[in-house]
Image (cartoon, rainbow, N blue to C red):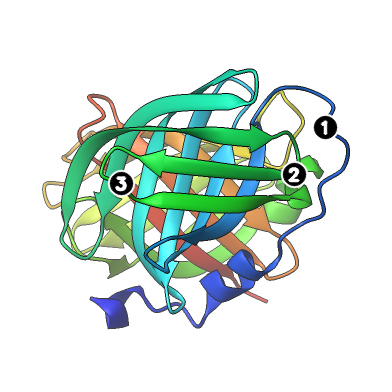
């Protein structure tokens, strides 16, 4: 499984760039947060302006899981619930979490299973998302919560159209668009076509994407309609 998910250390690049905070200008956990869980895995989270929360975790530069949920703040406290996609055991579980934060500085979260995570604010969140910068061809790996990763090339146009040619009988198409918040995150919708698609023929998955223009790395996370499964994509833009 690790060999399937190895993508030339791209996650190391993404997880290394922790940004400097700034002033505590509002009681909101919104932003990118990068740090470690007590188990030693690297964690990257995105808490959006509406509380939607997406993330992934890695071990030794290999992607091993993804997270999707919703976070609610109360003063300097936070709480939420969501799904944990373990890409090693290929299981999807539900859980709750709670913790504290200092806006644009630090965050500390404890999951219902006892796992803890502490992270720092990553200022890349404050850069505007750019379709012009994102557009291009990507090679990478895609996995669902219950199936192992496969190689999956995709192409994204400057208007935000996403296409994936058929891989083992499954193709995909969709769109990405900068969120109205003006932050460095894209809304993403993808439809899968083919009887071999892990999420099902005609399944629609909605989520977010993040592009790091420095490392030319794309991360996409999305859930199916019932939110029982989803996919994670990690790709490298072609020169």
Q: Is residue 7 above or below residue 189?
A: below
In the structure shown, which secondary structural element does the residue marked by tag 3 occupy? loop
Tell me the residue at 64%/54% (across/down): 211
Residue placed furthest toward the top: 74
Which quadrant does the N terminus fall into? bottom left
The circle on residue 114 is: 3
Q: In terms of depth relative to the viewer, which is nearer, 31 or 181?
A: 31
Q: Choose mark 3 or mark 2, whichever is in front.
A: 3
Find numbered disc 1 in the image and state the secondary structure of the residue it sits on.
Answer: loop
Q: Which residue is mark 1?
A: 24
The answer to the question of whether label 2 and label 1 lie on touching residues, with beta carbons closer than 8 A, is: yes
Label count reads: 3
Q: Secondary structure at mark 2?
A: loop
Q: Quadrant of the C terminus?
A: bottom right
Dividing the picture into quarters, in which one does residue 93 lie?
Answer: top left
Q: CA distance from mark 3 to mark 2?
A: 23 Å
Seen in the image, is 73 located left or right of residue 179?
left
């Amino acid at each position: 499984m690790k060999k399937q998910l190895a993508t030339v250390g791209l996650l190391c690049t993404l997880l290394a760039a922790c940004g400097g905070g700034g002033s505590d200008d509002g009681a909101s956990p919104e932003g990118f947060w990068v740090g470690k869980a007590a188990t030693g895995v690297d964690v990257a989270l995105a808490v959006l302006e509406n509380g939607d929360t997406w993330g992934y975790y890695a071990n030794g530069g290999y992607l091993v899981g993804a997270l999707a949920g919703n976070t609610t703040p109360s003063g300097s406290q936070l709480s939420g619930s969501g799904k944990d996609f373990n890409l090693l055991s290929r299981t999807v579980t539900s859980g709750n979490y709670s913790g504290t934060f200092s806006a644009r500085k630090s965050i500390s979260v404890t999951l219902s299973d006892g796992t803890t995570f502490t992270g720092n604010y990553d200022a890349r969140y404050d850069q505007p998302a750019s379709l012009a910068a994102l557009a291009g061809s990507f090679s990478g790996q895609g996995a669902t919560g219950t199936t192992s990763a496969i190689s999956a090339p995709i192409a994204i146009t400057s208007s935000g159209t996403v296409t994936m040619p058929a891989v083992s009988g499954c193709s995909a198409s969709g769109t990405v668009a900068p969120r109205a918040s003006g932050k460095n995150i894209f809304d993403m919708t993808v439809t899968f076509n083919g009887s071999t698609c892990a999420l099902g023929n005609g399944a629609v998955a909605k989520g977010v994407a993040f592009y790091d223009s420095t490392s030319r790395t794309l991360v996409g996370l999305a859930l199916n309609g019932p939110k029982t499964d989803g996919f994670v994509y990690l790709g490298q833009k072609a020169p």
